[in-house]
Image (spheres, rainbow, N blue to C red):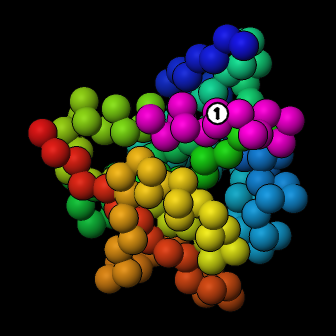
Amino acid sequence: MNIVVRTACDDDACLIAGLTRAAWRGKVASGSSGHSEAPERVAQHLRDGGAFLLLVNSVAVGSVRWMPHQLDAGVWDIMRMGVLPAFRGSNLSQHLLEAVIHHALASAVQELRLAVRSDQPKLLDFYAAFGFELAEELEYSHANPAEPAPCIMRRLLRY
């Protein structure tokens, strides 16, 4: 299995939107905005932050995005990470997360944050294995008010 993580470009917006919808189908609660992901939103995320694509044998099977936090450019929010169902169970998502961590370190970002939906508690342990800790004092600015608030996790980056 040949695994490659590459930086996404503007031309990948449609691909990433489709990957997000497909990766979240049946995995993330139907109320999540990821199920209605549009290429225009992805393109905006690419302009404001960035994304990585995960390729297995030259086929795109997953993606992740990051954006500078609204109030602090030294903080990045990691968002919309997903891997297609046929490729789960091989720890492929760790390649995406590691790529964001390394890129943040190279960019002198001080902190990474992510939100974990209340219906996905197993992800708390996954992210904790990469140095993320619960940050109960933080609120998720993009939360859907019709759903339970997600848990916010953070990883402080040391230089």
Residue 124 location in percent, x, y? 53, 64
Quarter of the image with the C terminus in it? top left
The residue at which mark 1 appears reads as: 92
Residue 115 location in percent, x, y? 51, 66
- Write down the quadrant of residue 71 in the picture: bottom left
Q: Is residue 73 in view from this perspective?
A: no
Residue 128 location in percent, x, y? 44, 57
Taking 7 as reference, is 16 above or below it?
below
Residue placed at 45% from the left, 51% from the top? Answer: 129
The question of residue 142 being in magenta is answered with no
Residue placed at 60% from the left, 52% from the top? Answer: 80
Q: Which residues are magenta?
A: 85-98
Residue 151 location in percent, x, y? 50, 75
The question of residue 87 being in magenta is answered with yes
Taking 65 as reference, is 138 above or below it?
below
Quarter of the image with the N terminus in it? top right
Query: Judging from the image, what secondary structure is the residue with disc 1 in?
Result: loop
